[in-house]
Each structure stands twice: as C-alpha cells, then as structure tokens.
Amino acid sequence: MSLDPTPPRSDDGRLLWSRSEELTGFEALMWRVEADPRMRSTVVIVETLDLEPDWDRFVAATEWASRVVPRFRERIVTPFLGAGTPHWALDPDFDLHYHLRRLRLPEGAGTPGLFTLAEQIAMTPLDPSRPLWEATLVGGLPDGGAALVFKLSHVLSDGMGLAQLLAGLHSRSREPMTDKPQPPPPSGPPATLSHEVVRQVRSDLGLVGGAARSLLGVASSLVRPDRAVRDAVAYVVSARRVLSPPPAPPLPALAHRSPSWRFRTLDVPFAELRAAGKSVGGSVNDAYVAGLLGAFRRYSERRGEPLPPDRLMPVTLPVSIRREEHEPGGNHFAPARLSAPVGIADPAARVVDVRRRMKIALGEPALESVEIVSAWLARLPGAVVAGFGGGATKSNDLQASNIPGLRDDAFLAGAKIVRSYPFAPLPGCAAMIAMVTHGDTCCVAANLDAASFTDLAGFEQDLADGFAEVLALGRSRG
C-alpha cells in the first residue's frame, strides 16, 4: 500500500497538517477515557537507523519540525470549570529541551534491548500539561546503528495522518537541505475567559447544528416515506452492529489483562504478502489478517486450548473514513468489528473467509456512526467515559491495523531509516498489532498484554509461522 501525497504547505512553509483548534468528538473521547490508566492512547514509533545522527543536527531538525508543524508546540486545554470539550492551544512554556532525550544502550543489549527500552518509554505516561510527544535518540545498536523512539498521543492523529506527517518531515537525502522553508515559531494570543466561553458556545452550536442537519435530512426524505422508513431501519440495525462488540467470545488463553505492555516485531516481504493475498482473490490486508489469525490459533493450541474449525474470535480493525474536506492529520477512522475465523487451519480458506467478512464490515451503512456517538459521549464525566470505553474494547482479543508507509529511502538528520515499527496503544484488548510498509518490507509491530501472553517467545514464533503459511500461498500458486 503506498502513502497518500505529502500534506501541502502554507505560503510561509508550514505543513497544512492537523491545524484545527477543536478536538473531534472521537479525539475528545480518547482524551477523557484516559481517566482509566489502562486506556491510555500512547503510540510509540521505533525507527531503526543505519548510523547514529549528530546530536546537534538532530536537535536542529526537531526544532525545525516544531515550527513547520505547530501542533508540536500545542497542548490540550481543559475548558474552564471542566465544562465542554477540550481543545488545542499553544503552550506558552514550550521547552524543546524537555521533549528531546538521548540514551545509549548497554554493551551487548542489541535490538532486544532497544525494544525493552521502548516498552518502558511507552508505559510511562505523557505529561498532559505539555505538548503530547517525546523523542528519544538511542545509540549503541549493533554495527554503529541507532534508533529514534518517537512517543506521542493517539489524540494527535491516526495512523494515516501520522504517515502523512512523516512523509512531510523526513528528508530524501543524507545531506542537509539548504532550501527548506523556515517559518517563524507559531504564535497566538493567550487564552482568556471570554475567548474560552465563545469557543465553547461555538463548539456546542456546531454539535447541535449537526444533529439538526441530520433531522432535516430525515424530514426531507419523507418525500418518499417508504424508502425513508426502510433506510432508517437499515441504519439503526447497522448502527447496533457497529457499536456492539462482535458476538464471538474471547479466547480463553487470552483471558487476563494488565497495564503491562510487551513489544515484538516481524519483518514480512511486501511483494510476497501481496502475492499471497492475490493468489486466492484477496488483498494485502486480507493476507495480513489471515497471518495474524494463524498465529493466534497456534498460540491457543499450544496453551492447551485447541480450536475447532468453526471457532471465531473478536477482532477490530480501524477503517479510514477520511473525506476530501478533512485536512491531513487528526483522527478520521471508524472501528470495523468482525468475528474472525481463527479456527480455520487452511491458510487459503482463511484468507477467503477474512475477505468475505471484511466486505460485510466495510459495507455497514452506519460505519461513521461512531463519530456521531463520540461527540456526545465526550461530554460525560471522565470516569463514566472510561467505563464505557473499557467495556467496548476489553472484549477484543485483537485490534489490528494496516498503515501505508514510505516506499522510497528516507533519512533523519543524515541517518537512513532502515525499519519503522508502529506500536499502537493497548486499550483493554489482549493484542494491538500494526503493520506499516517501509520500502519493500512490511514492518509488523505487536503490542501484547503481558498478562494475556505468558509465553512471549512462543507467540513470537507463532507469529512467524502464521505468516509463513500464508506467504507460502503465493509461492505455490505463483
């Protein structure tokens, strides 16, 4: 899957990325659900580098990025008296020194030590009074290599938006670019009580206006009452399916939950994964999900829970609902819930069944209803929101994401980016596994609940075996 075009720039050179002052209803919901520490929406992207960048050049590049993308200098502000929805505002005390860190791995720690460090960074909460990101340059990897551990809140953007962001910030050459735009630091007036009141009234009127427009749409459809009733019933039934957990019960082997995260990775050749899906009429994403399900089937069986062929498991996949009017960045996705065929041992049959179920999930008329519901839920007390959010996600065994990536060489302060692993948050589910295509390689990043997966080494092998049997389809039928 290739990356969407790089976000456009303003006249002064800033990226036109995630500029809205308002949080969407879904973003506000993600922010407030963090009243429960287990629902934190921390994302960690680990980029491995072929050499260790010069520190001063790295600092200068990050300072430049904070001017090109003003969101890096903004924090979330809670409305006065806690009423209404939170919003973005410039941090008057922005301090780049706080957000940048430099560490060196102990001798012999190697790549496993890097991901152990990344786990610890991910489980440490972001400071909510500051812009929601941190960047740690890690030295001491084998053969003179290094890594960037970029930590941020999911509230900033979804996977597609982050891919757009990195496409706009990463260089295409090792040498410094002398023609880069140099916008001044973002500036704005300090927040005042009157400004906050006006902003909140405007936000509330927008929410009510949206509901009113929906009602007017319903009223206008009464010109054809038979069609209106049929469409309305279909939408309500669809919304119930979209907003309800999938009917498949969780796997007993993954029953326990904790606040502890563990990271595992796998590299998969993109061309082979695409060929595997195509060999049975599926897509890269169908083959990807089928590979994951193969790993879960193997793990469950090794843990003493063999699965019958008709066994299903609850899986959620984010689906982009971006439209032309949406600016790059931000969060514009809906959760597609499905009961996934984890019990099918034949990888070809599994890919075909995944494709069939995904078509049904993507065809739901009410897929975007999550955005509508979120806008209202976000106004509830934080504890209530956290309880709702946890109940909606803890029944999932797996949340899986497939993110477009950079297909051409990219560089960070003179260092070539070798791999990019996106570890998404673990909001109550047993596993959150994301895949980004970097060059010719699909980088699979698994964030696993340490209580759910008590045999991490075993699951790492299961993951490799699950993809191996799917990749074999493309070779045997090519």
Image (cartoon, rainbow, N blue to C red):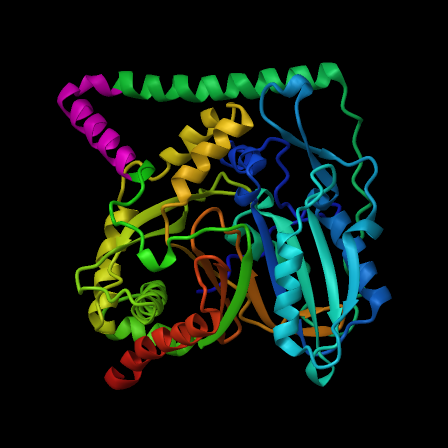
Circle count: 0
Left or right: residue 180 compared with residue 298 = right
Q: Is residue 170 visible to the viewer in this orientation of the structure?
A: no
Percent position (x, y) of residue 120? 65, 59
Percent position (x, y) of residue 358? 28, 54
Q: Is residue 146 visible to the viewer in this orientation of the structure?
A: yes
Q: Compared with residue 337, is residue 59 higher up or lower down, i.e. above or below?
A: below
Instruction: Choose top left, top right, bottom left or bottom right for residue 173.
Output: bottom right
Point out the stretch of residues depicted in magenta.
221-241
On whether residue 229 falls in the magenta region, the answer is: yes
Q: Compared with residue 336, is residue 372 higher up or lower down, i.e. above or below?
A: above
Tell me what residue is drawn at x 20 percent, y 23 percent: 228
The residue positioned farthest toward the left in the image shown: 226
The residue positioned farthest toward the right in the image shown: 56
Percent position (x, y) of residue 475? 30, 85
Left or right: residue 373 compared with residue 422 = left
Q: Quadrant of the C terminus?
A: bottom left
On whether residue 80 falls in the magenta region, the answer is: no
Tell me what residue is drawn at x 46 percent, y 47 percent: 428
Q: Nearer the viewer, residue 113 or 471?
A: 113
SS majority, magenta: helix
Q: Nearer the viewer, residue 38 or 323?
A: 38
Q: Compared with residue 281, is residue 323 higher up or lower down, i.e. above or below?
A: above
Instruction: Choose top left, top right, bottom left or bottom right for residue 363.
Output: top left
Tell me what residue is drawn at x 75 percent, y 77 percent: 140
Instruction: Choose top left, top right, bottom left or bottom right for residue 149.
Output: bottom right
Tell me what residue is drawn at x 81 percent, y 50 percent: 98
Q: Compared with residue 206, is residue 108 higher up or lower down, i.e. above or below?
A: below
Percent position (x, y) of residue 72? 71, 46
The residue positioned farthest toward the front in the image shown: 304
Q: Quadrant of the N terminus?
A: bottom left
